[in-house]
Image (tube, rainbow, N blue to C red):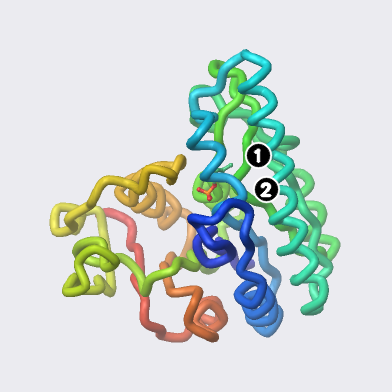
Amino acid sequence: MLLVKLGGSVLTEKARLRTPRRAAIRRLAAELASVRQPLVIVHGAGSYGHILASRHRLKDGGSTSAKRAAAARVQADVRELDRLVVDALNRAGFAAVPIAPSVVLTLDDGGVSTMDLTPFLEFSSLGFTPVTFGDVVRDLRRGFSVCSGDLLMLELARAFRPDRAVFAADVDGLFTADPKRRPKADLLETVSPNDLAKIEFSSPRRTDVTGSIEGKVRRMFEIAEHVDACMIVNGNVKNRVRDALRGKRVVGTRIVRGP
Ligand code: IP8
C-alpha cells in the first residue's frame, strides 16, 4: 500500500480564499490513477482551511457561538475541496471514498486521542481508495482544534505500514533555507534528524495554522519510522508524484529516520 499527501498549496491558490487549482487537481488525480497500486490519499486544506482557521484562531478551540460558527464554516469548506478532489479521482478511475477526520478522530490538546481506523481498513480491503484531509475536529481539552493532513499521514503510516509515503509540495523538496525567500538555497537529497542543524528555518507564513516547516519535518521523521521510504517531491512538476510513488529515483528529498 502507498500513502500520499497532496499539499494544499498544490491543490489551491493558498492566498485566495476557497480558490482551487482545478488543472493541478485533475492532473494529480490522473497521475495517481496511473500508479495502479492500492493508495490511501490525504490532502491539505490550502485556502479552504488555513485562511479562516488563522483569522478565527481555530487551533485554540473555544466555546463561543462565533467560534463554533467559524469552525463549522471551515469544516464545510474543507469538505468542498475534498469533493473536488474525490470527484477528480473518480473521473480518473478510482472508487474514492471520503473519510472526514471530524467524524473519525478526536484530539487531546492537539495530539491524537482516538482515531477510528476501521473505515480506512475496510474500504481499502474492499478495493476503495480512502481519501482524508486536514480538518477541524473535536479536541477533549480545547473543544475543537485543527488536525493537519500531516498528523493523519502519521496515524495512517502507523496503521498501514505502507511501502512508501510521498508528500507533494509546491517546491522540489527540503532546502537549506526557504527557496522562495532564498533562491540560492540548496536542495537536500536526504535529510535525517542530524541534518536539522544545517537548515535555516524561517518563521511560518502567518496563515499557515498547522505550523512551521521544522515541525512538519519532525513529523516526517516520525512517519519515516513506519514506512520503507518517505519522500517530499514537487507536485507541480508533471509525473513527479507518479514516479515517486512507483519508487523511481526523482528530484526530491528523502526523509530518513534517525539512528
Ligand atoms: O493543510 C490544515 O491541514 P493541512 C487543516 O494539511 C485546516 O495543514 C482546517 C486548516
Q: Residue furthest front?
A: 16
Residue visible at 56% across and 29% down in the picture:
145
Which sits in the foreground, 99 or 16? 16
- State yes or no: Cβ of the residue under disc 1 lies below 8 Å from any atom of ligand 1: yes
Pointer 2 residue? 78
Q: Secondary structure at mark 1?
A: helix
Residue visible at 33% across and 46% down in the picture:
204
State the image coordinates of residue 118 (x, y, percent, origin top left).
76, 44
Which amino acid is tagged 2?
Answer: Val
Q: CA distance from mark 1 to mark 2?
A: 6 Å
Q: Please report contact status of discs 1 and 2: CB closer than 8 Å, yes or no.
A: yes
Q: 120 left or right of 186? A: right
Pointer 1 residue? 74
Which amino acid is tagged 1?
Answer: Val
Q: Residue furthest left?
A: 198
Q: 128 left or right of 180? A: right
Residue visible at 71% across and 56% down in the picture:
82
Q: Secondary structure at mark 2?
A: helix
